[in-house]
Image: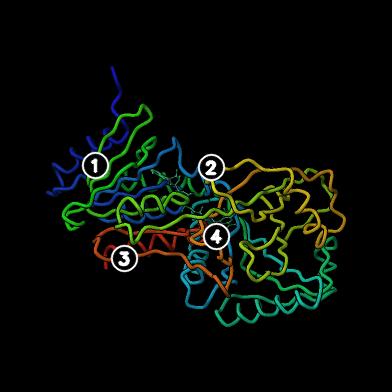
Amino acid sequence: MTRPSLLRRALRCQRRFFSVTRASSADFTHAVIGAGVVGLAIARELASRDGTSTILLERHGAPGTETSSRNSEVIHAGLYYGKDSLKTKLCIKGREMMYDLCAKHGIPHRNTKKWIVAQNEEQWEACLKVNEHAKSIGVPTRIVGREEAKRREPEVRADGGIVESETTGIVDSHSLMTYLQGDFEDRGGDVAFQTAVTRIEPINGGKEGYRIFATSEDGSEDSITAETLINSAGNFACYINNMILPPERHRTPYYAKGTYFSYSASHPKTSTLIYPAPMPGHGGLGTHLTLDLAGRIRFGPDVEWVDDPNDLKPSPARLQQALPEIQAYLPNVNPEAIDLDYCGIRPKLSRAGSATTGKGFQDFIIQEEEGFPGFINLLGIESPGLTSSLAIGEMVKNLIHR
Ligand SMILES: Cc1cc2nc3c(=O)[nH]c(=O)nc-3n(C[C@H](O)[C@H](O)[C@H](O)COP(=O)(O)OP(=O)(O)OC[C@H]3O[C@@H](n4cnc5c(N)ncnc54)[C@H](O)[C@@H]3O)c2cc1C
């Protein structure tokens, strides 16, 4: 006997639910594509309204197995982006929401703080610009004096100076996603794993919702309908965009791979996150030092443009390039204890994209698409997407219910 697909099972439960609660021609009120941290946060927000039904469609067998489990797990302060950008607004709001949620529900996290370190005059100028900008947008930062630096982090070199971000921290992203999935289901939401969306048809131009076709693990195809559709497919969001919008609104995805390096020696140690001064035009924040909740150091990610979003194999050549960057701020690091670890891929909307303010800066795109009512598109959700996830969930809910 063939088992019904997870999509069909969710649909059956839904039809029973609908028969007693509401009359609607669509199977679900909301369908969210992608169970990364952002899709989970959105689905959880949408599931909190009475009389609605939300389904989360995920092609893998578990939540967050792509970019959401391949990042630095840093709760960013929101230091680097333009005042009016979504990245700034959602990062600041999301950071506050994240600390509150973690404290309330026992999700492991720590306010480690972060140092941005300069080794020369030019880098110090860049750090001072970050400091000024942070103050102008209300993100707390301060300059750390030499004595204090020596006392707190004797192993860290910062010949040009240090700016500290006081609200930066770390979170256990897996615990966070487990919590979000559980809470979504407690609120009545359905998750259909092993369900890869392959095709989408707007019904009457989207005015009556969307028909979503998906294949299960065994290759069989099913479809459901939903009144609103949220594209939160991470590195594959451009493909979903191109399934719905006309050719002139198609998007080309670009991928910036980041490689991480593990550190197995117990010396030197730090208790603060260490970032190099930001370099204009750099696709990331430089090869930095982050910590996991057990206090283990990891370095990275670097930036390497790749054509394949599944190209997740770390390459030994990256280690040679990263080493001098690491030694610049951690001179006593033991090179033999540094090893290739894992990779993550940033969804970029252009190759010129700078990670911070300045030329080529690409903001998050989160919008209801013109001419396609109820289709909310999320594109370019790179860093600080983890930090912003809860605020993005709230923003999408407001877009739908405004
Ligand atoms: C190297 C690196 C470091 C980072 N560090 C940080 C950090 O320290 N702090 C921070 O705030 N942010 C960080 N980020 C950013 C953060 O990780 C992402 O913004 C966030 O994880 C994006 O989540 P998401 O849910 O949008 O995407 P994903 O986690 O990629 O989830 C998308 C989901 O959609 C599913 N999907 C795709 N196509 C389909 C389909 N057709 N049908 C069904 N399902 C589909 C995928 O399987 C996937 O599970 C980093 C990112 C990278 C790459």
157 or 327: nearer the eye? 327
Q: Which is nearer the N-term, disc 2 or disc 1?
A: 1
Judged from this view, the residue extending furthest toward the right is 332
Q: Secondary structure at mark 1?
A: strand
Q: Nearer the viewer, mark 4 or mark 3?
A: 4
Number of the front mark, 2 or 1: 2
Q: Earlier in the sequence, mark 2 or mark 4?
A: 2
Residue under label 1, please give it.
224
Are the residues flagged by discs 2 and 1 in contact, CB closer than 8 Å? no
Mark 2 or mark 3: which is in front?
2
Marked residue nearer the N-terminal end (1 or 3): 1
Q: Earlier in the sequence, mark 4 or mark 3?
A: 4
Could you tell me residue 160's position as x and y percent? 81, 74
Between the C-alphas of marks 1 and 3, the distance is 23 Å
Q: Which residue is mark 4?
A: 383
Q: Is residue 141 above or below residue 264?
A: below
Residue type, mark 4 in image = Ser
Give the residue furthest to the top.
1
Way the structure is coloured: rainbow
| Snapshot quadrant of residue 356 | bottom right
Q: Secondary structure at mark 4?
A: loop
- In this rendering, the answer to whether 392 lies above or below 8 is below
- Amino acid type, label 1: Ile
- Mark number displayed over residue 399: 3
* Residue type marked 2: Asn
**Is residue 345 or residue 182 the one in the foreground?**
345
State left or right for residue 256 relative to residue 146. Answer: left
At which x and y percent is residue 217?
A: 38, 30
At 35% from the left edge and 45% from the top edge, which residue is drawn? 56
Alpha carbon separation for disc pair 2 and 3: 32 Å
Callout 1 crowding tier (Cα within 10 Å): few <14, some 14–19, many ≥20: some
Relative vertical location of residue 241 with respect to residue 124 in this rendering, above or below: above
